[in-house]
Amino acid sequence: MESHMDKKTLLENLCRIADGLVAFWGRDYEIAIHDLSRLESSLVHIAGEVTKRAPGAPATDFLIDHLSRYAADAPDVRPYRAQGRHGEPLRGSLIYIKDDKGVPVFAMCINQNISRQMAAIAALEARGFPPAEAASPESFAARFAVFPHCFFVAEDDGAIVGHINGCMTDFDTCRDELYHDAGLHREEAPHQAVFGLVVDPQRRHQGSGAALVRHFLEAARQRGKEDVVLTCKERLIPFYSSLGFQLLGRSDSQHGQACWYDMRCPL
């Protein structure tokens, strides 16, 4: 015998899930539950305080526009970039909860304030690169909002001690424009670029950098990429060569007005 959950029970379960997840994830997260039958006051439950909204608030412009565009066929959206009321960078996901006829009845909006994580990564970046080459917290936030699955960090007792990131691209070398425009990321592109590898100076020569690169290579391999491409300084050519990268020659990159070399690791 089929069992159909009524809307009230479904909402109660969604609220419990939201409360439990935010309690587990911590203060940088928020889950909002919207009743799509009442967009003018759709927010019926919120766990967390990232956006400081309260039940009874209307649906966001993003949610309204998305529903207007797709109606009952609205697909989930994850991830997307947003901003808090004070301009703080947010990473969001939108998940539709549908009834047994496939009609969206609730929307679960997950928001993450990534300010602290991006600040920690940018601070580490500043210790590893000269100012002209280091990415800013704003740049990291823009990248993370578009391709968070291409960010990996090394942690020690909860502190970030290393990171690696980069986008997927149609370019077969790591071009300068990729650093400055996260929108150039293309999920189905054949190449995975590395923008930067940084390890805390006090923890270098302990294998963390090599471990991050190997993990990055394996992630790209599992996603079906042809290769991983990067540019590096001359002194780092032996390091990347030891991890399977091939030297392609002097790069055209003008990033930071430094001299760079193109390298490629076939997968």
Image (cartoon, rainbow, N blue to C red):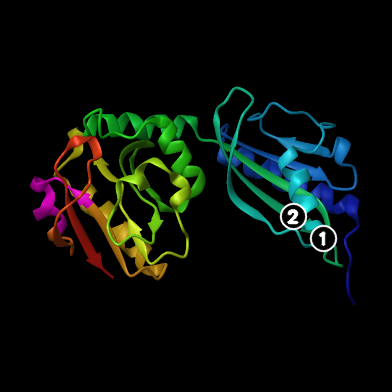
Q: Inspect the magenta stretch and tell me whether residue 239 lies in it.
A: yes
Does the magenta portion include 184?
no
Q: Could you say which disc has been placed on residue 72 in the image? A: 1
Q: Nearer the viewer, mark 1 or mark 2?
A: 1
Neighbour tally class for label 2: few under 14, some 14-19, many 20 plus, Cα within 10 Å = many
Which quadrant of the structure image shows residue 35?
top right
Identify which residue is drawn at 74% across, 38% down: 61
Cα–Cα span, label 1 and label 2: 10 Å
Pointer 2: what residue? Answer: 96
Give the position of the N terminus as an image quadrant. Answer: bottom right
* Viewer-nearest residue: 227 or 37: 227
Q: Residue furthest top?
A: 86
Q: Residue 174: x and y, percent? A: 29, 53
Earlier sequence position, callout 1 versus callout 2: 1
Q: What type is the residue that disc 1 sits on? A: Ala
User: x, y percentage for residue 38?
Assistant: 90, 42
- Circle 2: element type: strand
Residue 28 location, x and y as percent?
A: 56, 33
Relative side of 233 to 119, left or right? left
Q: Residue at the location (27% across, 29% down)? A: 126
Image vertical order of residue 117 relative to residue 181, above or below: above
Residue visible at 85% across and 32% down in the picture:
56
Magenta part of the protein: which range? 231-240
- Which residue type does callout 2 highlight? Tyr
At label 1, counting other C-alpha atoms closer than 10 Å, the crowd grade (few under 14, some 14-19, many 20 or more) is some
What secondary structure characterizes most of the magenta part? helix
Relative side of 225 to 265, left or right: right
Q: Quadrant of residue 25?
A: top right
Pick the quarter of the image with the C terminus: bottom left
Q: Looking at the rendering, which quadrant does residue 121 occupy?
A: top left
* Total numbered labels placed on residues in the image: 2
